[in-house]
Protein backbone atom coordinates (compact mmCIF):
# COMPACT_ATOMS: atom_id res chain seq x y z
CA UNK A 1 0.00 0.00 0.00
CA UNK A 2 2.75 2.45 0.91
CA UNK A 3 4.52 1.79 -2.39
CA UNK A 4 1.40 2.85 -4.30
CA UNK A 5 0.99 6.16 -2.46
CA UNK A 6 4.66 7.15 -2.64
CA UNK A 7 4.56 8.31 -6.32
CA UNK A 8 1.38 10.28 -5.67
CA UNK A 9 2.96 12.02 -2.69
CA UNK A 10 6.04 12.83 -4.73
CA UNK A 11 3.96 14.38 -7.52
CA UNK A 12 1.93 16.44 -5.05
CA UNK A 13 5.11 17.66 -3.38
CA UNK A 14 6.60 18.77 -6.70
CA UNK A 15 3.41 20.56 -7.75
CA UNK A 16 3.08 22.38 -4.43
CA UNK A 17 6.68 23.62 -4.65
CA UNK A 18 6.14 25.54 -7.88
CA UNK A 19 7.31 29.13 -7.47
CA UNK A 20 4.65 31.78 -7.14
CA UNK A 21 5.55 35.00 -8.95
CA UNK A 22 4.77 38.41 -7.45
CA UNK A 23 4.35 41.71 -9.28
CA UNK A 24 7.96 42.60 -8.44
CA UNK A 25 9.24 39.23 -9.66
CA UNK A 26 7.41 39.80 -12.93
CA UNK A 27 8.87 43.30 -13.30
CA UNK A 28 12.35 41.81 -12.97
CA UNK A 29 11.51 39.01 -15.40
CA UNK A 30 10.24 41.58 -17.90
CA UNK A 31 13.52 43.49 -17.78
CA UNK A 32 15.58 40.29 -18.04
CA UNK A 33 13.40 39.22 -20.95
CA UNK A 34 14.14 42.55 -22.65
CA UNK A 35 17.86 41.87 -22.23
CA UNK A 36 17.37 38.58 -24.07
CA UNK A 37 17.61 36.02 -21.28
CA UNK A 38 15.66 32.99 -22.60
CA UNK A 39 14.60 31.46 -19.26
CA UNK A 40 13.33 34.83 -18.03
CA UNK A 41 11.33 35.25 -21.24
CA UNK A 42 9.74 31.83 -20.83
CA UNK A 43 8.93 32.38 -17.14
CA UNK A 44 7.52 35.83 -17.89
CA UNK A 45 5.26 34.49 -20.63
CA UNK A 46 4.08 31.61 -18.46
CA UNK A 47 3.53 33.31 -15.09
CA UNK A 48 3.11 37.06 -15.49
CA UNK A 49 0.15 37.62 -17.79
CA UNK A 50 -2.10 38.52 -14.85
CA UNK A 51 -0.03 41.57 -13.87
CA UNK A 52 0.12 45.04 -15.36
CA UNK A 53 3.84 45.50 -15.95
CA UNK A 54 5.45 48.93 -15.58
CA UNK A 55 8.86 48.08 -17.07
CA UNK A 56 7.67 46.75 -20.41
CA UNK A 57 9.85 46.06 -23.44
CA UNK A 58 8.64 49.34 -24.94
CA UNK A 59 9.63 51.36 -21.85
CA UNK A 60 13.02 49.63 -21.71
CA UNK A 61 13.54 50.46 -25.39
CA UNK A 62 12.66 54.13 -24.79
CA UNK A 63 15.09 54.30 -21.88
CA UNK A 64 17.84 52.64 -23.92
CA UNK A 65 17.24 55.10 -26.77
CA UNK A 66 17.57 57.96 -24.27
CA UNK A 67 20.79 56.44 -22.94
CA UNK A 68 22.19 56.10 -26.48
CA UNK A 69 21.25 59.73 -27.23
CA UNK A 70 23.71 60.78 -24.52
CA UNK A 71 21.16 61.39 -21.81
CA UNK A 72 22.73 61.19 -18.36
CA UNK A 73 22.05 58.00 -16.40
CA UNK A 74 20.83 60.11 -13.46
CA UNK A 75 18.26 61.84 -15.67
CA UNK A 76 17.08 58.47 -16.99
CA UNK A 77 16.69 57.19 -13.41
CA UNK A 78 14.66 60.27 -12.49
CA UNK A 79 12.48 59.93 -15.59
CA UNK A 80 11.82 56.17 -15.44
CA UNK A 81 12.68 55.20 -11.85
CA UNK A 82 15.79 53.62 -10.35
CA UNK A 83 14.72 50.11 -11.38
CA UNK A 84 15.13 51.01 -15.07
CA UNK A 85 18.79 50.03 -14.72
CA UNK A 86 17.57 46.42 -14.87
CA UNK A 87 16.75 46.96 -18.54
CA UNK A 88 20.36 47.66 -19.48
CA UNK A 89 23.12 45.13 -20.03
CA UNK A 90 26.61 45.72 -18.66
CA UNK A 91 27.65 46.40 -22.25
CA UNK A 92 24.95 49.09 -22.63
CA UNK A 93 26.11 50.80 -19.45
CA UNK A 94 29.80 50.65 -20.32
CA UNK A 95 29.21 52.03 -23.83
CA UNK A 96 26.59 54.70 -23.20
CA UNK A 97 26.29 55.62 -19.50
CA UNK A 98 27.59 59.03 -18.51
Image (cartoon, rainbow, N blue to C red):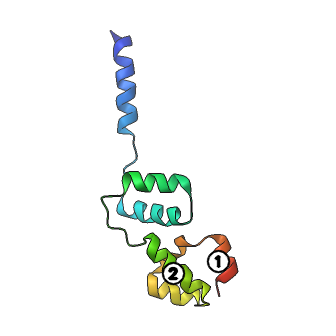
Residue nearest the observer in this picture, 23 or 62: 62
Q: Residue at x 38, y 12 (%)?
A: 3
First in sequence: mark 1 or mark 2?
Answer: 2
Find residue 57 and report its horizontal and vertical position in percent. 46, 70
Q: Position of residue 68 (x, y in %)?
A: 61, 84
Give me the residue at 45% from left, 52% from top: 43
User: In screen coordinates, is 80 left or right of 87?
Assistant: left
Q: Return the residue nearer the eye: 36 or 17.
A: 36
Residue pictured at 53% horizontal, 71% vertical: 87
Mark 2 secondary-structure assignment: helix
**Residue 49 in view:** yes
Nearer to me, 79 or 68: 68
Please give the residue where the numbered disc 1 appears in the rendered image: 93
Disc number at residue 81?
none
Q: Position of residue 21 (x, y in %)?
A: 38, 54
- Foreground: 65 or 55? 65
Kindly report the distance in space between the C-alpha atoms of the residues bearing marks 1 and 2. Answer: 12 Å
Query: Which residue corresponds to mark 2?
Result: 63
Residue 21 visible to the viewer: no
Amino acid sequence: MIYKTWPLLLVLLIISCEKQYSQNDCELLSMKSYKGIPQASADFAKHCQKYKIKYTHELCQQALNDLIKATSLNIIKKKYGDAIIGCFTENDLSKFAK
